[in-house]
Image (cartoon, rainbow, N blue to C red):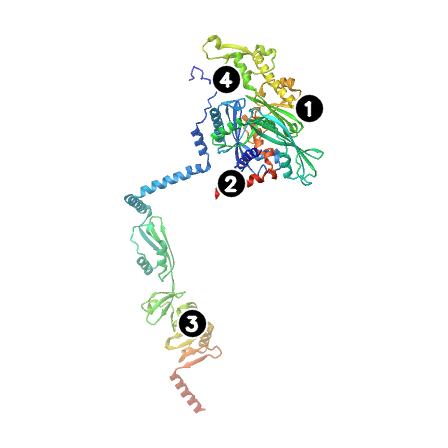
Amino acid sequence: MQPLSAPKRPDPTVPKADPAPSRWSYRLHRLWLTPVFRKLVHVGAPFTAALVVGTVYLSDEARRESIVLAIADLREEIHTRPEFMVNLMAVDGAGEGVNEDIREIVPVDFPISSFDLDLEQIRSDIIGLSAVKEASVRIRNGGILQIDVLERQPVALWRSDETLDLVDREGVRLGPVEARTARGDLPLIAGAGAEARIDEALKLFAAAAPLSSRMRGLVRMGERRWDLVLDRGQRIMLPEDGPVQALERVIALSAAQDMLARDLVAVDMRLAQRPTIRMNAEAVESWWKIREISVGNN
Amino acid sequence: MIELYESQRAMRNLRKAAMQRGVVAILDVGSSKIACLVLRFDGADPAGGEVGSLAGQAGFRVIGAATTRSRGVRFGEIDVMGETERAIRTAVQAAQKMAQVRVDHVIACFSGAEPRSYGLAGEVDLEGTVVTEQDVSRVLSACDVPDYGAGREVLHAQPVNFALDHRSGLSDPRGHMGARLAADMHMVTIEAAAVQNLAHCVRRCDLELAGIASSAYVSGVSALVEDEQELGAACIDMGGGATGLSIFMRKHMIYSDAVRMGGDHVTNDISMGLQVPLTVAERIKTFYGGVVATGMDDREMIDLEGDTGDWEHDRRSVSRAELIGIMRPRVEEILEEVRARLDAAGFEHLPSQQIVLTGGGSQIPGLDGLASKILGQQVRLGRPLRVHGLPQAATGPGFASAVGMCLFAAHPQDEWWDFEIPVDRYPARSLRRAVKWFKDNW
């Protein structure tokens, strides 16, 4: 719809209004164009106003309390949302005993908020267990505290003065065993400093496989060399260097001459050039008797 | 002359300060409009001696421009202080708004206040064999200043020529060998009251006056092309209330004068002759005005609409020929008067007699034909040259003096007071000043 009357044209004879600014508006305009003033208004004034309002508002003790309380409430509310709650703990990769140990040393009362769990602390606690080699702790979907554990594998029994312990390949004690027969499959070692050389001991055990039916264990002597102990109180004293070769030599001798079946106390291999055997006192006497007889005969 | 040195030097220092801040305003106080341009100077010191690229126009940029109807200015002089102050305020505020920057320093020009032009000559013997700066200032101060009357003030005093022994036409005699140095100087004086009024108005607007110039001179700077300035030409700036004329030769102004008649008088004649208000007369002049009537103009009727309520009076119309018949005698009178001033200045003895018409009044159609009959054959219409950032609306001939002021602000001509005061004028005064300082402080 168009209006029927023509739009009003500006009267060309009347000059366009060109009013002069008043003195004050002119001054204010100039002031406004001053950079320092502009910055003051744009930055300084809001900052000051905010500071003053904030200071006045916070100067009241009750208001401060209520703000702190409100923040704490909000925090609590967010923490206890079901999305952040952890309800149970799952331990994977641990045996029965270790599992129980872990549950014992991780003192968490479920359900708990995941914000309150210090996973790093839990992990270091678990790693502190001697039976645990590695552990990873995370919170899985569904509010589960997932603990993955890599256990240490016992490779030997280590007998010290009173106790009989399981030892892993790195020489870490894993826990006591009541009797030697409980873990008959593991070799037995003893002596101070033995746990530091488990590797060497295992090699020796491997080399001594032909003697396994008679073997009792390995004893670390003076923290520098090994003695292989057999039944009937026999010992094979191995040197510091190349104990495996020395042992193989003994086994070869034994196989050839049936040496170990005789009435020996010890086979001394400490000096490679001069292997020595020590006989039982009775064996020596009977040997002497036999010699006398045979000498008398001669 | 010492007072003159000091006031002009103070203005020069203000100009330098403004250049350092980078922003300066140009104010053209005319009788029909007041124009304000805001210039931003960038780069190195433009007054560093050598003329830069683009003849020195590259050093600045117009960042704000505003123009307003002039109030309270008649014949190029301030008539009503309050009104003028308000008009200046309007223009400056609008220009500042466009530039988004505050200006504190203003260089102003105006056309009235009866400029008078003097040629001065001085001669000294050199102290050494080589002309030094000190010698130049000595020869300038040796110029015998005529008695230009009480209540007048020197506006420009520019050395235009140096002669060393028998060689003349040196523009820079420093370093030349010789014995006797002579100088020619061109001096323009105006009424001191006009300058003081302008300074007062500017100060009332919280601005500082960093320089003043004659509008005839600055419009010549912008409207004449370089070879015209070099070979000799006259620039006629036809303004609203006054018509300024300046003669240039070898890139220096050598004569300046003003006729106290302009476009407002033409408007007045139309208003009286056709019995219409001034605003209608101004509109008719700008839309239908001319100075050469043809047969077609008899048939072109102009409606004179009025608002008096008298039907007969409000429905009149005149032919364009009648309008031209009113305008032409007045324009002729102005040009005749200019002719008389040019004759008095000896313009016909100049090697080149180019005449350039500029200013708002030069836009009357057919003016160049009429002017060539009265002033001589070589007449052209001049527009100001282009400067960076000048709005399209401010490129017309009416802005010749405003644009010329931009060039003047960027590259002022060496004036008398730019040279050191000669040594022999120092001692008594400075000793007295030192004593006064001690007295004041201890």
Q: Are marks 1 and 3 in contact (CB under 8 Å)?
A: no
- Cα–Cα span, label 1 and label 2: 54 Å
Q: Earlier in the sequence, mark 1 or mark 4?
A: 4
Q: Residue at x 47, y 79 (%)?
A: A274
- Considering only vertical position in the picture, is A64 above or below B367? below
Task: Tell me the amino acid under the disc marked 3.
Answer: Pro
Residue B305 place in picture, x, y as percent: 49, 12
Residue B260 place in picture, x, y as percent: 57, 20
Q: Please tell me if label 3 and label 2 are on a single chain.
A: no
Q: Label 2 crowding class (10 Å Cα cut-off): few <14, some 14-19, many 20+? A: few
Q: Which residue is mark 2?
A: B436
Q: Which residue is mark 3?
A: A210
- Cα–Cα span, label 1 and label 4: 43 Å
Name the mark on residue B418: none
Closer to the camera, B269 or B440? B440
Q: Are marks 1 and 2 in contact (CB under 8 Å)?
A: no
Q: Which residue is mark 1?
A: B349
Tag in front: 1 or 4:
1
- Cα–Cα span, label 1 and label 3: 140 Å
Task: Tell me the amino acid under the disc marked 4.
Answer: Thr
Closer to the camera, B246 or B328? B246
Residue B216 place in picture, x, y as percent: 59, 26
Q: Label 4 crowding class (10 Å Cα cut-off): few <14, some 14-19, many 20+? A: some
Q: Is residue B224 visible?
A: no
Instruction: State the count of labels.
Output: 4
Q: Please tell me if label 1 and label 4 are on a single chain.
A: yes
Report helix, strand or loop for mark 3.
Answer: helix
Q: Which residue is mark 4?
A: B279
Which quarter of the image is occupied by the N terminus of chain A? top left
Task: Tell me the amino acid under the disc marked 2.
Answer: Lys
Task: Tell me the amino acid under the disc marked 1.
Answer: His
